[in-house]
Amino acid sequence: MTRFRLPTLPTLSPLTYSALLTLVLALLYNAPLWQLILDQSYPSDLKRWGFTLAFFSFIYAVLQLCMGLFCWRQIIKPLAIFLILSSSSISYFMQSYGIVIDKGMVQNLFQTDVAEAGELLSSGLILHLLLTGLLPALVFLLIPIKKVAPLRMLALQSANLFACLALIGLNAGMLYKDYSSLFRNHREVRNLAVPSNFLYYGGRYLAGAYDPEDHSFEVIGADARRVANPLQPVTSSPRSDLMVLVVGETARADHFSLNGYDRDTNPELEQRNVISFSQVESCGTATAVSLPCMFSFLGRDHFDDTRARFQSNVLDVMSSAKIDLLWRDNNSGCKGVCERIPSEEPKQFVVDADCADGECFDESMLNRLDEFLNQDSGPKLLVLHQKGSHGPAYYKRVPENFQRYTPVCESSELQTCSAADIVNAYDNTILYTDHFLASVIDYLKTKQANYNTAMLYLSDHGESLGENNLYLHGMPWLLAPDAQKHVPMVFWSSESFRNSRGIDQTCLQGMKDKALSQDYLPHSLLGLMQVSTNAYQPELDMFASCRQSESQLALQPVSADQAG
C-alpha cells in the first residue's frame, strides 16, 4: 500500500525565501492595484505594459526592501504565514466590495463585533481564503530554509538593500513624470497596495488606540446650565422637556422620498408634519468615525479620534446641565460616546417577539421607556442608536411585513446580486426606518400632556450600493462618493415644544435645502435643550435663525463681569 507523502520542496536561503514571498504578495493580492495601473490613459499598448512592468518592479523593490530586513531564518516563515493569510482576507474584501484600506477602514475592522463579522462570512470568502490563503501558506510552511552564517547573512541583506534602492532610484529617475502624475491623480494607490496598506494603517491605529496614558481628559462646558425660557408659559404645573435623538445607520438621503426619491419610502413620515433637511453631509464614511465626530465639538475639519476620546462631548455637557440622559443601542456600540452616561444594550430592553434569529428590530428600543420617564420629572434626552440599514445583509434588518420591494438580495456577497435586488433590499430598510421614526413620534405624542416633545433623526453615514463597483461604506473621505457622505436628517416637534422656544416652523421649512453637516448637531442639541455654555456656537445651531430673539439671547452664557 502506497502511503501519501507531501512533495519535497527545494531548500531556499532566507533571502531567496523572502524574494519568493514578495513575488507572491505583489502578484496574488493586488488585483485592484494592477487594474488601476492598466486602466490609465497611455499613448500605446507598449507604453501601457512597459509602465505596468516598471511599476511592478517598483512595488517589488519596496516590498523586498522591507522583507529583506526580516529574512532571518527564525522570523521569515512565521511572518510569511501571517502576511499570506492576512493579505488573502484583505484582498477578498477589496476585490468584492471595492473598498480601499486606510486608518478608518482598519478602525472599522478592529471595532467589528461578532455579529457583524458573521454576516460577512460567505462561501465566496471561504473559497478565496482556501485558494489564496491556506494553500500558499501551506506551501511556504513546507519550504525548508537553509542555515546561513550570520556574517554572510548580513552581507546578503546589504546586497539586497542596495539592489532594491537602486531599482527604486532607477524607476524614480527614468519615470519621474509618470509616477508624479499617477500619485497626484490617484492618491488611493497607497491604499490599494497590499500588504503595505493594512500594515501601515494598522500600525497607526494601534499606536493611537493603546496610548491613553499620554492624554489627560479635557473638560468642555463645565459652565453648562439649563436656562429659563422667557417664552415658556407660567403655569402651576409646567411641562418638562423630552427629546429623542435617533442616530441612523447607513441611510442615504437620496433614498428618502421626503427628499425626492421616486419610491415612496417615507409614507408614514409624510403624514407626521416633519421637516426633512435634504443637504446634510456626514463627518465620516463609517460609524467608527462619524459617531464620535458628530457628538464632538471638534468638527470634521479638526476631528481626531484620539483627541475626541479624551474630551467632553455634547452628551457630557448636557449631563453637566442636569439633563437626564439615556443611550439605547441596537447596533455595535456607541464607540465611546456614551461612556459617561447611562446606556442600555438590547438584552436590557428587548422581548423575544422583537427578535428573529438573533436580529433585534429597531422597534424594540421603544420597550419600557416609561421606566426612564418615571425616574424624575426633569428634562430628558433619549438617544436611540439604530441598526437601520446596516449591510451587507440588508434583508435581515426588517420584519417580514416590511419586505415591500422584491425580489431582494439575500446574500452577503452583494457583487453576486443584481443591482435591482440590492436596491430593493436596501429600500426596504429605509421603509422600516420610516415606520420606526413614525412610531417614535407617535410615542412622543402620547406624552404631550406632561412634556414638550421633539425628535431629531440623523444618519451616521451613507452607503454605496454597487455604483462604480463600490459596495458598503468606509471609503477615505476624499475618495468617497456622495452616496457615502450625503445623509438624511428629519425633525419633528410638538406645538408646545416650538412655542416654548419661539421656533418658527415656516422658517424651518424654508431651511430644508440649506447645506448643513453633522458639525451642527452638538450646538443644535444645546439650543433645543436650552443649555447655556461657552461651548455653544450659535452659528452652528441650525435652529438659531428660526428662534425668537428673546429665546436665543437666553442661551448666551453669562460672563464673569455680568455675574459680578
Image (spheres, helix red, strand yellow):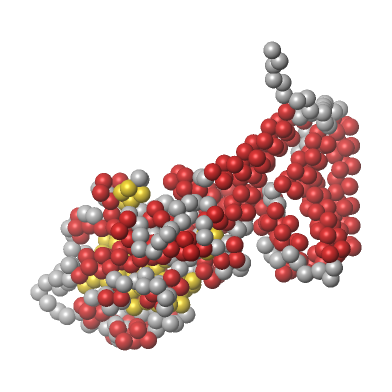
Q: Give how far across and how far down residue 260 sits, in percent.
A: 42, 78
Residue 364 makes an appearance in the image:
yes
Q: Residue at x 56, y 56 (%)?
A: 415
515 in relation to 458, above or below: below
Q: Give how far across and how far down residue 19 sits, in percent.
A: 81, 41
Quarter of the image where the N terminus is located: top right
Quarter of the image where the C terminus is located: bottom left
Nearer to us in this view, 137 or 71: 137
210 in relation to 482, above or below: above
Left or right, 423 with reference to 478: left
Q: Residue at x 85, y 45 (%)?
A: 161
Question: In which quarter of the view is residue 40 placed?
Answer: bottom right
Q: Give how far across and how far down residue 6 sits, in percent.
A: 72, 24
Left or right, 547 with reference to 390: left
In this view, the residue farthest toward the top is 1
Counting labels gives 0
Q: Residue at x 35, y 60 (%)?
A: 403
Nearer to us in this view, 74 or 26: 26
Q: Residue at x 46, y 77 (%)?
A: 279
Left or right, 186 with reference to 559: right
Question: In which quarter of the view is residue 319 placed?
Answer: bottom left
Question: In which quarter of the view is residue 507 placed?
Answer: bottom left
Residue 111 makes an appearance in the image:
no
Q: Give how far across and how far down residue 337 sits, in percent.
A: 41, 57
Nearer to us in this view, 207 or 411: 411
435 in relation to 86, above or below: below
